Amino acid sequence: MRWACILCLLTLPAGWAAAQEGAAVGGAPVETAVAGADAGEAPLGQPAEPAPPAPFPAPAGATARDKPNDGGGAIAIRWQPVPGAMAYRIERAGEDGAFVPVGAASALENAYEDRVEDGVAYRYRVVALGPAGEEGASPATLPARSRPQWFNGDLTGVALSVVAFILVVAWFIRRARRGEQLFVRRIAGLEAVDEAVGRATEMGRPVLYIPGTGRIEDIATVASMNVLGEIAKKTAEFGTPILVPNRDPVVFTVSREVVKGAYTAAGRPDAYDPNSVFFLVENSLAFAAAVDGIMVRERPATNFLLGSFFAESLILAEVGASTGAIQIAGTDQVPQLPFFVVACDYTLMGEELYAASAYLSREPLMLGALKGQDAGKLLFMALLVAGTIFSLITGLDAGWLLSTSGY
Amino acid sequence: MNWERLLKIDRRVIFLTMALAIILPLLFPIRLTMGVQRVTRNLFQAVEAIDPARQCLLISTDYTPQTEPENHPMAKALMRHGFARRVPVLVNALYVEGAPLIDQAITEVMGDFNARATSREDSILYGRDIVYLGWQPPPIVPILAMGESITGIYPDDYYGNRTDSLEVMRRIRNYADVGIVVAITPLSSPLWYVQFAQTKYGVKVGAGCTAVCAPDFYPYCATGQLSGMMAGMKGAAEYEELVEQKYRTGGRLKATEGMASQSAAHVLIMVFVILGNVAYFAMRRKS
Amino acid sequence: MKDKLPLILLIVVGFMGLTDRFLPHPAPEHLNQYMRDTLLRIISAFALILGLGNLILRHMNRIRKKSTDWPHSYTLLISFFVASVIGLFGGVAGELWFPTRVGTFDFNITTIYNQMLIPLGASMFSLLAFYMASAAYRSFRARNWLAILLLGSAFIVMLGQVPIGYRISPAIPEISQWIMEVPNTAAKRGIELGITLGVLATFLKILSGIERSWLGSGR
């Protein structure tokens, strides 16, 4: 998500102008009611309130408006802080006009969000509470109604950047479709795949492929499935047994289909062994123990550890190293990368894992997407630098920047 | 000197010395003073800022027995903090395997407080001061659904009570009433809360994580997306100390007890690295 | 059709997931919620049945074929059967009809959890300490200036994460925290920026049908 924040930095001028106008960007019209400036006007239909225990300065500029960019059900109340106030009490009047307390805010706060029913008009007033129990109530705001918005205007910058990125990738895919040759840099870990599978064939030992301990909704697991397809094609061609233990039952069903499909695509459906892809256990460390057992028992010549890995990464990689297997690892879990670097022969870092299937298959369209990804990254880096310079020049602080992006 | 031997110490020797380095300080405890990291203090301050009258502390756990020694003291320290401040505490488990552990933690911390209580007001009562929401799969579902209604996604608590019948749940509806969610994890659940709950509902998020995950979360602390963090057992020990210093809640401070052991283990790893390097350079010079 | 139907489903569901971030209105929100709360759970439950079926069949095969260390498969099958019977018919704490108490000895699911799962799980996790020591000793060599820098940072962070570092000098935890917050964050952000764009590109490749290996079509 952080890149999203960076992108929002680049859309600051529009967001800043919108914030200044107090308008919701891209959302439904916002009803804003301001009290304070027109404090002399008596709120209509408001019953007489008992006098506060002792006078205290009332908060000025109290406003109530539909909370922008949400799914409805909320009204945002703001006011100017009163020096010396200990806390604030927020009171609401519905259709009957009677004010009832609905919440409180500390002396440090000057905003409150009230959960309400959509479409109903509510008025608010903010009562400042003094140290000796004194009270000062702001005039009532004009009625405000909450309503849901269809688009979250806070994320306009993110949406635009996603569209820009899609266009860049699509352009490169189009270039690849036209038959243009695209250069992709060498990735040592992926160059070694053929050698690693070949070694297993020569030694007459199996290849062990661990698709991580993540779930299918983790994109690293999906990327791992794509790589598994390519590696299974190679094991099918070389006639080398492959073992694919799984931790997640959904991943297990997908990886079984992937291996079966790869053997069919390689023209060796007869060589596919349904027992080669199997489910072990959902508990990740128990899974690590079971896989360690396979490493020690079956002595695979090559271990692929590609996908989402967590605490079990070193347990798997160290035991694999102790069996003398060639190990090619890759994950997008940054804290696990150092463990793989020390214990494995090759490590794919972060996005290299996502690039792996394109790299191995050398399919022009996939390479086009990969080039598009690189170009997108370059574009974002340029925008990042430009945004940083813009931020340094204008002096806009990061906190305000984050608030415009919805954090 | 036989440098080659020093360069190839049998891994069983390493394992044995490591076991001794961990076990001995546990058998013969030494109390060590420690500083408090900024991220831990920030988390403490964030919990301090909760308004007990209208907000609650939500402790979200996704740890399993594997990381119990590191994560369990974090959950207990947070409960102690919440109870000491009379902030209602809600707890959930994102994975079923860890669910009974939370029940143990609640029983233990409630027991500690109630043993010293002199009246009903002093006591920690289930349903008034704490609710254990239990487990709802898969994790993404409760994380998002709590933004709309907590009792909606957790109609029954861990013990089978209707959550809408519990006293505190009448005023705690969704994230709008949650002062901070502290996700205690060996994985990345604090980031799920940041990505899904914070971006959508604006709730504050804190983290309690195993030391190996901590580097993942520092950037989020820097941006303020995480209000604070307990990083590993050291972070848990610091939090225990902060709560103990301010509120004198008592009870066993298990993370603090483990600090001497952890110190010894870290020092031993450094010794092995130094030995390996000395032997490596000696061999290189020789050759 | 075998290929197209999953792809169409993926495109529809993928776009719904994507729009969930941008459309706060209750209508798409409720549809997404239904898919998450109900459909995802049903799929997970069926997949678990498939997984467990596979586990049992695989180990029965191992016993039948007398594969390497085949007696271990008996351990798994017996443990699986016993734990399932105790859990399904004895209840979490022995509250159901199946007897889970002999004299003063309980053997319900809570006992299995407390007395077996917790210590076994903690033991597995604790292996990390041993493997870390062994891996660090084997691989951490100050071969060049960059490696020396890495080694120095590692020592400061290791000392900063334990009280002994504070005892040596209160500056050590401060420097350690700086290393974590500044250089670590800078490196991590660089990697994560690439990862995030990689995720989006992978999503696009799948959504546009360029990447179909996951379908099992062999392409």
Image (cartoon, coloured by chain):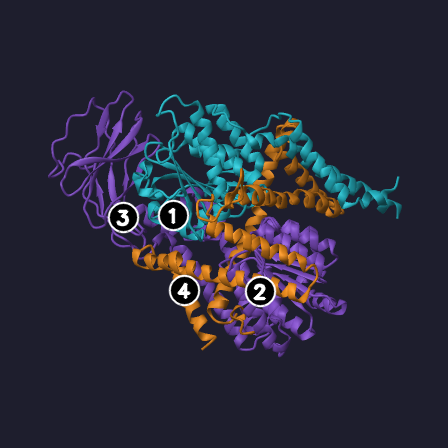
Chain colours: A purple, B cyan, C orange
Distance (Cα) linking label 3 and label 2: 52 Å
Q: Residues within 10 Å of mark 2 (few under 14, many from 20)?
A: some
Numbered disc 4: what chain?
C
Q: CB atoms at circles 4 and 3 under 8 Å apart?
A: no
What amino acid is labelled 4 in the image? Answer: Val
Q: Which residue is mark 4?
A: C13
Q: Which residue is mark 1?
A: A404
Q: Residues within 10 Å of mark 4 (few under 14, many from 20)?
A: some
Q: Nearer the viewer, residue A208 or B237?
A: A208
Q: Which residue is mark 3?
A: A73
Q: Quadrant of residue A161?
A: bottom left
Residue A389, horizontal then vertical, whole percent: 49, 48
Numbered disc 3: what chain?
A
| Residue found 51% across the figure and 53% down from its top | C84
Residue A167, horizontal then vertical, whole percent: 46, 66
Distance (Cα) linking label 3 and label 1: 20 Å
Secondary element at image label 3: loop
Q: Quadrant of residue A122?
A: top left
Q: CB atoms at circles 3 and 1 under 8 Å apart?
A: no
Mark 3 or mark 1, which is nearer to you? 3
Secondary element at image label 2: helix
Distance (Cα) linking label 4 and label 1: 28 Å
Numbered disc 2: what chain?
C
> Same chain for the residues at labels 4 and 3, yes or no?
no
Q: Which residue is mark 2?
A: C57
> Same chain for the residues at labels 4 and 1, yes or no?
no
Q: Nearer the viewer, residue C55 or B78?
A: C55
